Amino acid sequence: MSEKHRPRRAKGGFIPPADVSSEAETEEPEPPKSRKARIIIISLAVLTTLLIVAGIVAYSYINRLQTVFEEERNVIEELDDLDDETAYRTPEGTVNILLLGSDSRGEEEEDYREETGEDGERSDAMMLVHIPEDRSGIYVMSIMRDLWVDIPGEGEGRINTALSAGGLDLALDTVEDLLYTHIDHVVTINFDGFEDLTTALGGVYVENPRPFAAGQQNPAFYPEGAIRLEGSDALRFVRERKSFPTSDHIRVENQQLVMRAIAERFLSGDTLTNPERVFAVLEAILPYMEMDAGLDANTIVGYALDMTHMRGSDIHTFTMPAGEPHTTSGGAQVILPDDDMMDLLRRSLSSENMDGFMRYTEALEPEPGTATFTVTDDEEPFSRQLGRQLGESINREE
């Protein structure tokens, strides 16, 4: 057992080469006293993207948006200040957000833990959203729950067990140490919220690459091709893993498919030109989410205004590099990291070169789970796109 972990402290771990962080190696810098973050957030818990776009679309409704957000949002009171000793690892304007899809079952929690044999809440879905300082893109990286990593103060384990071992503080520290980066915000969502989100949107549509069935009792079947997902069917689609030979890989791909479908559904004209639907989505999802205190209404509005130049092709989704399946000495089936690719990922994050990382990995082997959003054929910036859609809506009413 490792030495007892002290949350929210840099633990060392990977040290970037001299050309990336030579100052950090020779002189311990003073952490900045204030980091005014600007960000757009996306997730399996895609509230972040929804809020950003809502702020743009419903600008004239901004007071109502702020009221809904502040009344409904849940703040993670127990989470320590995120402006900690790791802040020097990223440039001032860079923003990282950790999205956690919790496997909490609310009132059914005790029965669920007894059935699964697990000790406590785990992060069933994990994503890191990276926004470069120059706002050149949005990079949404899925992290496989079975990835075998060092958990500070606990030793080696699956990355999703950090949440049950030490709460959100330890989960954040684990990801920060793994990537040698700093996390600015954290958002969690439970599965009930995911169901309600897809229902509020009137269902989402995905192109399913493989047929499969999910569920022991009353199983649901998902045929290959274009399918519609809503409520419990959407939840089963993103949670299923036992039907696939490479279980966690395929589940992460399915989560990314649905995440993109949710964002594209929200960005569609029939949603964006209907403020009531925008607010219905927010009111449906916010009660099931928790976020750090720094992610308030004013911050969200600032993010929206900062990102209006974005196009659909500027939003990228991919999976953290991983190696081969492995059986531990205790018999656990896990996935080992790909050390060489992880080194490249860390350097790319530190040097703000995620675009280069994406081009390199796609050239090596195009990955089915790697994609950009497809919003409109003409690839207009979001601001122009939304203005056009609102204008068309007004003309139809007249």
Image: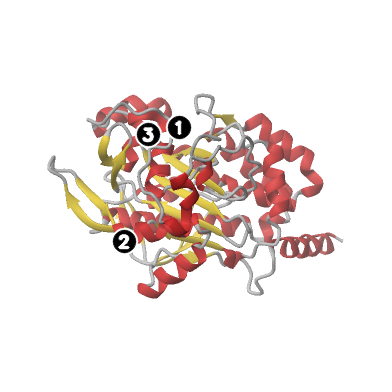
The N terminus, quarter of image = top left
Most distant residue in the right direction: 398
Of residues 152 and 264, the one drawn nearer to the viewer in this rendering = 152
Image position, residue 207 (x, y; %) = 45, 66
Q: Is residue 83 above or below residue 133?
A: above
Of residues 391 and 222, the one drawn nearer to the viewer in this rendering = 391
Image position, residue 244 (x, y; %) = 26, 57
Task: Kindly identify the amino acid type of the residue bearing the numbered disc 2.
Answer: Asp
Task: Kindly identify the amino acid type of the residue bearing the numbered disc 1.
Answer: Arg
Q: Secondary structure at mark 2?
A: helix
Sequence-first disc among 3 and 2:
3
In the picture of the structure, the residue carrying the numbered disc 2 is 340
Residue at left 53%, top 59%? 352
- Colour style of the rendered protein structure: secondary structure
Image position, residue 166 (x, y; %) = 36, 29
- When asked about the image quadrant of residue 6, the answer is top left
**Separation of disc 3 and disc 1 at Cα?**
14 Å
Image position, residue 44 (x, y; %) = 48, 48
In the picture of the structure, the residue carrying the numbered disc 3 is 163
In the picture of the structure, the residue carrying the numbered disc 1 is 8
Q: Secondary structure at mark 1?
A: loop
Name the mark nearer the viewer: 3 or 1: 1
